Image (spheres, rainbow, N blue to C red):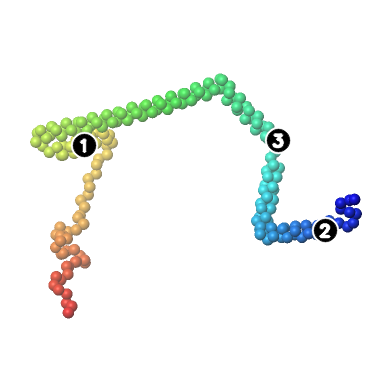
C-alpha cells in the first residue's frame, strides 16, 4: 500500500500557494514602501548620481598611459632618492644651509651682545656722573638730563636744528579757580539747603 494514496492531495495545491505568496509579497512591499518610501527614493537618486560621477571620472582620464607615466615618474624619483651620490649631494646642501643659518644667528647674537654692552656702559657712565654730582652737592637729576641731551646730540649726526615750541596761550584765564564757583562759564553747581524739608 502507498502512504499518500493515489487520490487527490490533502492540502492546498500549488496554485493556492502561489496566490497566497503573491498576496504576502504585496502586503510586505506595500508596508515597506509606506514606511520607508521616501528614504528608498532618496537612496536610489543618490546612488544614481554617484554612479554618474564615477563614470564621468573614469571617462575623463586619458587612459592607462597617464597612469603609467605617473608611475614611471614616481619610480624615477624614488630611484634618484636611493642613489648614493644624490643622497650625499642632498645632505651636503642641507649641511651648508644649516651652517649659513648658524652663522647668521651667531652674527645676530654678537650684534645684540655689543648693543647690550654699550647700553650697560652708558648706564655705568650715568651712574658715575650722578655720584660725582652728588659728591659735589649738585642736583644729579639736572646733570642726568644734560648727559642724556649730550648723548642724543652726539648720537644724532643729522644737522637738523631742533625747533622751539611756539608760545601757546593757556586754555583758561589766570584767575580761574574751579573751587570758587566763579568764572567757570555757564555751569555752576550749588549745594542744596541743609534745613528740614518743607513738608508738613
Q: Quadrant of the C terminus?
A: bottom left
Q: Where is residue 156, by image quadrant? A: top left
Which residue is drawn at the image coordinates 75% and 58% (left, top)?
24
Choose between 24 and 128: the one closer to the eye: 24
Among the two numbered marks 3 and 1 on one chain, the one whose residue lies closer to the N terminus = 3
Q: Position of residue 48 (x, y in %)?
A: 69, 51
Foreground residue among 77 and 14: 14
In which quadrant of the rendered view does residue 62 lie? top right
Toward the bottom, the furthest residue is 200
| Crowd tier of the residue under label 3, counting other residues whose Cα lies within 10 Å: few below 14, some 14–19, many 20 or above | few
Mark linked to residue 79: none
Q: Label 1 neighbourhood size at 10 Å, few (<14), some (14-19), many (20+)?
A: some
Labelled pair 3, 1 in contact (Cβ < 8 Å): no
Q: How many marks?
A: 3
Q: What element carries label 1?
A: helix
* Disc 3 element: helix
- Can you give x and y, in whole percent of width and height, for residue 56 in the image? 69, 45
Establish if 37 lies above or below 128.
Answer: below
Seen as rendered, the residue at the extreme front is 1
**Circle 3 is placed at which residue position?**
64
Give the image location of residue 185, x and y in percent: 20, 65
Cα distance, mark 2 to mark 3? 61 Å
Q: Counting other residues with Cα less than 10 Å from the Cα at mark 2, is it few (<14), some (14-19), or many (20 or more)?
A: few
Q: Distance between the residues labelled 1 and 2?
A: 120 Å
Q: Which of marks 3 and 1 is in front?
A: 3
What residue is disc 1 on?
A: 148
Which residue does the numbered mark 2 point to in the structure image? 12
Amino acid at each position: 500500500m502507498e502512504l499518500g494514496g493515489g487520490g487527490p492531495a490533502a492540502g492546498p495545491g500549488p496554485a493556492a500557494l502561489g496566490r497566497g505568496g503573491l498576496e504576502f509579497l504585496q502586503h510586505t512591499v506595500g508596508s515597506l514602501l509606506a514606511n520607508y518610501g521616501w528614504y528608498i527614493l532618496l537612496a536610489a537618486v543618490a546612488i544614481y548620481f554617484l554612479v554618474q560621477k564615477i563614470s564621468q571620472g573614469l571617462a575623463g582620464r586619458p587612459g592607462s598611459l597617464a597612469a603609467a607615466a605617473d608611475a614611471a615618474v614616481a619610480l624615477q624619483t624614488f630611484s634618484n632618492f636611493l642613489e648614493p651620490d644624490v643622497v650625499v649631494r642632498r645632505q651636503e646642501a642641507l649641511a651648508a644651509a644649516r651652517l649659513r643659518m648658524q652663522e647668521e644667528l651667531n652674527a645676530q647674537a654678537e650684534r645684540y651682545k655689543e648693543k647690550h654692552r654699550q647700553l650697560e656702559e652708558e648706564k655705568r657712565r650715568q651712574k658715575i656722573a650722578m655720584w660725582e654730582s652728588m659728591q659735589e652737592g649738585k642736583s644729579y637729576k639736572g646733570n642726568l638730563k644734560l648727559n642724556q641731551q649730550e648723548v642724543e646730540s652726539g648720537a644724532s649726526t643729522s644737522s637738523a636744528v631742533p625747533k622751539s615750541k611756539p608760545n601757546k596761550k593757556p586754555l583758561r584765564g589766570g584767575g580761574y579757580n574751579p573751587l570758587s564757583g566763579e568764572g567757570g562759564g555757564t555751569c555752576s553747581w550749588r549745594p542744596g539747603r541743609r534745613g528740614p524739608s518743607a513738608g508738613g
